[in-house]
Image (cartoon, grey):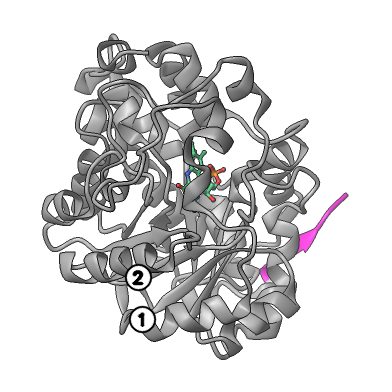
Amino acid sequence: MTLARAVPRAHEKDDATLASLLSVADFEPIAATALPPSAWDYFRSGAGDERTLRRNEEAWREWRIFHRVLVDVSKRSTVCRALGIPSAFPLWIAPTAMQCMCCPEGECDTARAAASVGAPMVLSSLSTRSVEDVCAAAGTGAVLMQIYIAADRGFTRELVQRAERAGCRGIVVTVDTPVWGVRERDLRNSFRVPDGLRIENLERAGMPSGHSGRGMGECLGWTIDASLSWRDLEALCSWTSLPVIVKGVCRADDAQLAVQSGAEGVIVSNHGGRQLDGAPATAESLPEIADRIGDCAAVFVDGGIRRGVDLLRARALGASIGLIGRPILWGLAAAGERGVRRVLEILRHEFDLAMALAGCPALESITRDLVRRGP
Ligand SMILES: Cc1cc2nc3c(=O)[nH]c(=O)nc-3n(C[C@H](O)[C@H](O)[C@H](O)COP(=O)(O)O)c2cc1C
C-alpha cells in the first residue's frame, strides 16, 4: 500500500455532512468507504473469532439504567479530573496505532480536536507522528504516552524520558501483549505499515520501523517482550516522575498487584478485543476491579464505549474515565480534525443528556445503584 493509497479518497466530509451524523455509529460506514480495505480491516478487526470484540459493545447494554426522577437537573456539570488531569467530561482517547492511515495529519489532528473539546489523549507508541509533534499540536491539551516495554529496556526508558521531555502528563504501559494477538484479517491482507508512513517514536534507536513482515507479529515483534513481569513494572515506575497507568487488566488481583508495584491507575481493557479472544468484556470485569482498588488508585475502562449512556454506566460501575479507540479513527477517516471533534462533541452531548435523564446533576450522583445487570 502506498502513502497515496493509504490516504482516503474522500476523507474531508463537509460541515453539513458532519452535522448530519448524529451518533458514533453513523461514522462507521463513512470510514469503511473512505479507507483502503486493508486499513479498514486493520482498524476494525479483533483477534480470533472476534467474540471479545463483539461482547465489549453488547455488555454495556446489558446494564439497565434505573434512573431517578424529580431531581433538579437544571444545572449539570460534567467536568472532572483524574490523576490531576482535567477533562470536560469523563472521556479520554485510547491509544490507537498508525492514525496517518486515516488522514495525512493523523495523530496531530486527533490532538488538536481533543484539546479543543477538553478530552485528554493517550498517544500510541506506534503512532505515525512523533510525540514531540503531537504534544505541540495539542498545545495546552493533555497528552499521555502509551508504551510497550521492549526487550531492549534501555530503549523503553529513553522513550519514557523523551515523552516526559515532550510534555506528556502520564505514561500508560500496555501489559496485555506478551505476544501479539492473531488478527486473521491482517494476515489474509498481508497487512504491513504502508510505504511512506513512519512509526516515528520507534525510529531513533536505529531499529527497524516495521516495514516488513505480515501482520503486527512479524512487523513489530521487537517492540514487546514475552518475559515481562511485575518487577519490570516496578522498574518502569522508578524511571519517571509521571503517573504510570497500567493498561490491559481484567482481574482484581492483577489490578491490586499493579498498584502495589507503583501504578497510580489501571485501565480495565482487553485491547479492544485484539489480544485474547475469550477475555471478558470490560463492562463485566470493571465492577470487581473498581471495588478492589477504587479507593487507592484511578480506575479507567475502555472497549465498546459508543454512547454517552455507556460512559454513564462506566461511571456507575466505578470507573472515573472511559476511553474510546475506534470511534476516533472513524472520525479521522471522515474528516480529520473536524471529524474527531464532531465524534467527541456527540459523546459529550449524549453524556450530558444521559445525566439529566438519569436524574444525576453531578458526577458524584452517578452511583452503583443506578445500574443493574439484565438478561
Ligand atoms: C486499530 C487499533 C490500534 C490500537 N493500537 C493500540 C496501541 O498501539 N497501543 C495500545 O495500548 N492499545 C492499542 N489499541 C487498543 C486501544 O487502546 C483500546 O484498548 C481499544 O481500542 C478500546 O476499544 P474500542 O476500540 O472498542 O473503543 C488499538 C486498538 C485499535 C482498534
- The residue located at (53%, 57%) in the rendering is 311
- The residue located at (23%, 42%) in the rendering is 129
One can see residue 288 in this view: yes
Q: How far apart in space, not on screen, are marks 2 and 1 (Cα)?
A: 7 Å
Residue 30 covered by magenta stretch? no
- The image position of residue 240, as x and y in percent, is 33, 81
- The image position of residue 60, as x and y in percent, is 68, 50
| Disc assigned to residue 157 | 2
Q: Do the residues labelled 2 and 1 touch (CB within 8 Å)?
A: yes
- In this rendering, the count of numbered labels is 2
| Disc assigned to residue 44 | none
- The image position of residue 87, as x and y in percent, is 31, 66
The residue to which callout 1 is attached is 239
Circle 2: residue type: Arg
Taking the image as shown, residue 298 lies to the left or right of residue 135, namely right
Tag 2 secondary structure? helix
Tag 1 secondary structure? helix
Residue toward you, 279 or 148: 148
Disc 1 residue: CB within 8 Å of ligand 1? no
Residue 372 covered by magenta stretch? yes
Q: Which quadrant does the N terminus fall into?
A: top left
Residue range corresponding to the magenta coloring: 370-375
The crowd level at tag 1 (other Cα within 10 Å; few <14, some 14-19, many 20+) is few
Above or below 122: residue 160: below
- The residue located at (25%, 12%) in the rendering is 4
Taking the image as shown, residue 52 lies to the left or right of residue 359, namely right
Residue toward you, 23 or 50: 50
Taking the image as shown, residue 148 lies to the left or right of residue 122, namely right
